[in-house]
Image: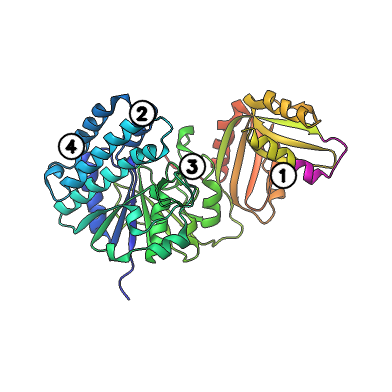
Amino acid sequence: MGEAWTVHKFGGSVLRGAPDLDRLADRIAEAEGPAAVVVSALWGTTDRLLRAVDDPRYAERLVSDLRSHHLMFAPRLDRGRDGNRFEHVLESMAVALRLRRANPSDDAARIQLLASGERLSALVIAHHLRRCGFAAHAVGAEDIGMVLSGVHEAAAVDLSRSAENFDRSIMHGIPVITGWLGSGNDGSLALLGRGGSDHTATAVAHLLGAHRVVLWKDVRGIHPVNPRWGIKTKPISYVSYELARMAAGLDATVLHPATVGPCIEDGIPIEVRHLSDSLKEPAPTTIGPELIADLGPMAAACTMDVCAVEAAFPPVGTPGSQQAALLTQLANRGLGVHASTSWVDGTRLIVDASAVEEIEASLNDVGMHIDHVGAPSAMITFIGAWQDPKTWLQHLGLDGIEPVDHDARKIRILVPREEAKATLERMAEQAAWLAKA
């Protein structure tokens, strides 16, 4: 049996300038055993391509600008062994832009255009690694057999079909693989959601039977509170797969929602590291199997400007069926519900404050009326593991809180909007999340 692989994923946030490629090469040099690299587009490239999708009138300027930008990272790429591939990607971009200008609903051209960012990045990074002495080569995710579970856009990698199609012969030297994309169910090119390159990396790890995945970021690990709140916290040293999956839909995380799934069956650890830190140092955050059954709160996330809406059911059917039908109708109308509970003759919905009027109209359509609308608030979600979440909630000791719901993995409360940061800060202090100055 050969040596175990390490899969490294480098996102656009750490690919901002040419010096970042030197740090990338340093991290690969520190790795033991075979390494595979998964890459996102260079910083800012995907945003420019997304704008071009909606306004493809400046095709020639965009292609020219991106050509120059990528050659700043990888001088002489256009004259090296991948020069023809580099020019082919640029020409494909120009063609896709012309097709979108002629037909704004051309989804295939849209996908082709967006995927070009990762294709260019893979060529740039493979070129740089070769200059540093590594046997690197750029690989399209679809070329190794990566299949996504959708057409044009998909939520996840289809692991079973990808395993059937996986071409291990391509995985020699250091393959530099395009993140975010693969073949769709219909065989055409498809994309994952934003941030999907993390998921590509864990899918590659699953296919290779890798012994770890390293996600290189511009933050040191996953923090219990989103840094945008200005609360200086310590990274979470260890996160279970289950809690990482739960946190992925909230603002306390830096992961794509499908990231951890491919690693669970084989117990492959996922490390979240900063590009400037040596691979020989302990990872700030490691994601793996559950080890602690009652650790209390691990992280907190906040959703601003929500309202609690209480309404009465009409006197027909059962509360469960009425609640399910109501939530389905709201979803079909594009009206999201953050949380919901029901009782014998009514329901309580936590919804965006801006959507209350639309929610009320939908309730009226099914013969329901609103009994109460709470003040616009902030919903704070605590993620962790509790043997007795109800008791923990009762002992929070926070003024002005209104419980929403709780279970063994999460506890949700409402607080006044102006108290959101203070509540997060107090919880960070109580749970010893605050970093020392």
Q: Residues within 10 Å of mark 2 (few under 14, many from 20)?
A: few
Q: Amino acid at mark 4?
A: Met
- Look at the image and give the residue range highlighted in magenta: 313-323
Mark 2 → mark 1, Cα distance in angstroms:
61 Å
Q: Residue furthest front?
A: 102
Q: Amino acid at mark 3?
A: Leu
The kind of secondary structure element at disc 4 is helix
Mark 3 → mark 4, Cα distance in angstroms:
40 Å
Q: Which badge, 2 or 1, is on the more N-terminal residue?
A: 2
Q: Is residue 239 magenta?
A: no
Residue positioned 42% across, 60% down in the render: 162
Instruction: List the residue tagged with mark 1.
Output: 394
Mark 3 → mark 1, Cα distance in angstroms:
23 Å
Tag 3 and tag 4, C-beta contact below 8 Å: no
Q: Is residue 315 magenta?
A: yes
Residue 430 occupies quadrant: top right
Q: Which mark is residue 434?
A: 3
Viewer-closest of 75 and 165? 165
- Position in image of residue 392 (x %, y %): 68, 48
Q: Residues within 10 Å of mark 3 (few under 14, many from 20)?
A: some
Q: Which badge, 3 or 2, is on the more N-terminal residue?
A: 2
Q: Which mark is residue 72?
A: 4
Q: Is residue 186 left or right of residue 94?
A: right
